[in-house]
Image: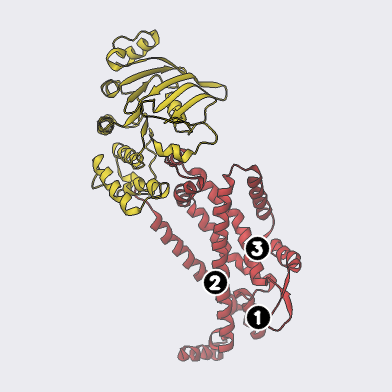
Chain colours: A red, B yellow
Amino acid sequence: MEAVWDFLRHVHDAYGVNLVHFYDGFERGRMLRGMWTTLQLATLCILLSVVIGIVGAWVQGSRSRLLRAVVQGYIQFFRNTPPLVQMYFFYFALGPMMPRVENEYGIPQPILGSFEWAMLSLSFFAGAFNVEIFRSGVEAVQKATVEAAESLGFSRWQIYREVVLPLAVRVCLPALNNNLVNLAKTTTQAYAIAVPETLFVASQIWSDRINVFEMMVTLLTFYLLLVGAFVWLMGRLERALRVPGFGK
Amino acid sequence: MSTWTPEQPIVAIADVHKSFGKVDVLKGVSMDVRKGEVVCIIGPSGSGKSTLLRCVNALVPIDRGSIRVEGQEVHDPAVDKLELRKKVGMVFQQYNLFPHKTALENIMMAPVMVLKRPKAEVEAQARQLMRKVRLDGKEDAYPGELSGGQQQRVAIARSLAMQPDVMLFDEVTAALDPETVKEVLVTIRELAEDGMTCMIVTHEMGFAREIGDEIYFTDRGVIVEHGPPATFFTEARDPRTRAFLSQIL
């Protein structure tokens, strides 16, 4: 590896292309920790927002009008307001209301940090879309298939889990992919509440080292690879879920 | 809880009324089905035949009247629908298999999930049922890879896996092409010969005549007349029955 770093150092000296965030051990550490934070944030948000989507779509089929209204209100709120404003609302308006706990130095601090607030607000934001996406899949499942499950004595939850959801997922996977790709990219918004994710550390590095152009290219390449890997995974999932003779 | 004995009708339908909005689909239907009996219900489209079957396993609630299965009122709000559906199996016109599960999985799902029976035991039974409906070798095929007739036989096996006391067949051959109708009818006939109580809504008159112990003719929500096939098809009294039979025989 050292040879590569030496080469990049030479590139900097000879051509003025400053890739200090690769060859300098300190900057490299910051950069990698930022990317790791992005990866964690994106993964947790994707999982949580999918859970919200699945549960929300189930509740939308509930007999209770109150429950349906709660889900509807949730969707309207999170879909019709800007995600950055939502994140500010969570962090600056709700955050101070939360109980405080003592940290390892004995100083009281909010129970949820900026990472947690970013995770929650982004998950709720994408979750609202996911509910609608899953609902569209649920509505595409034939009523007769549900009836067959009913006539075999399945409970409502068993029908959803074993019949409706597996079929709905196959229908709505392309739309779900789109939303999750958007979500992965929107994690950069956590910059606004100082979550040390990739964009945040990149801006620190380019302020310290004045290598804005190189950092931008690095950032774009990172997201291209990250989202590319995610899309590839989802493509594999889609193929794995393919059922012979279904949906053709 | 009533005390039902096998001498009493296994399905007792009394004065059942059902309307969808302003349309009266069932207008006072009564019929008794005894254990081991095969009842065929015929009649023009829209006469309420399918609705009647769907009321028997509580897929559709009734407005008035009573339906008892083994003495248990089906439309009592306190009734355990699960208990009812363990007793009553249903096969549909469009097969309604679970398209994301193999034939064998389709058969195994309900006994494992609903009856909580051990998987190995259920699988052995499911394989046996596949042989019974002559589909051994197709265990791992998905519904989309099977013909209509094959799917319908899987659907029959799926219902039988719950070991019901009564089987409801709702125009099970109506969506099939003529060559495959026969393979499904053969399966149903074998069931009937094994002593299964069957309520069959059908347009296959020849089949009804051959297999039925009692034929019911329904029209516009009422039972016009009924009788054993030997007399029903030759000595129908009501002009509506005669008109219907003359059209299709």
Q: Which residue is mark 3?
A: A121
- Circle 3 chain: A
Q: Chain of mark 2?
A: A
Q: Earlier in the sequence, mark 3 or mark 2?
A: 2
Distance between mark 3 and mark 2 Cα atoms: 17 Å
State the SS at label 2: helix
* Figure check: A199 above or below A211: above
User: Rounded to the nearest whole Å, what is the CA distance between mark 1 and mark 3?
Assistant: 24 Å
Residue displayed at 58% across by 51% down = A56
Q: Are marks 1 and 3 on the same chain?
A: yes
Q: Residues within 10 Å of mark 2 (few under 14, many from 20)?
A: some
Mark 1 vs mark 3: which is more N-terminal? Answer: 3
SS at circle 1: helix
The answer to whether A92 is drawn above or below residue A217 in the figure is above
Q: Answer with the quarter of the image where residue A110 lies.
A: bottom right
User: Three-letter amino acid code at disc 2?
Assistant: Leu
Chain identifier of the residue bearing label 1 in the image: A
> What residue would you read off at disc 2?
A39
Residue A18 in view (yes/no): no
Three-letter amino acid code of the residue under disc 1: Gln
Percent position (x, y) of residue B61?
52, 30
Q: Position of residue A79 (x, y in %)?
A: 65, 54
Instruction: Report the number of discs.
Output: 3
- Across and down, in percent, residue B185 comes to 27, 30
Left or right, B79 with respect to A213, comes to left
In the picture of the structure, the residue carrying the numbered disc 1 is A204
Work out how far the residue at label 1 is from the one at label 2, CA to CA, in angstroms: 19 Å
**Do labels 1 and 2 touch, CB within 8 Å?**
no
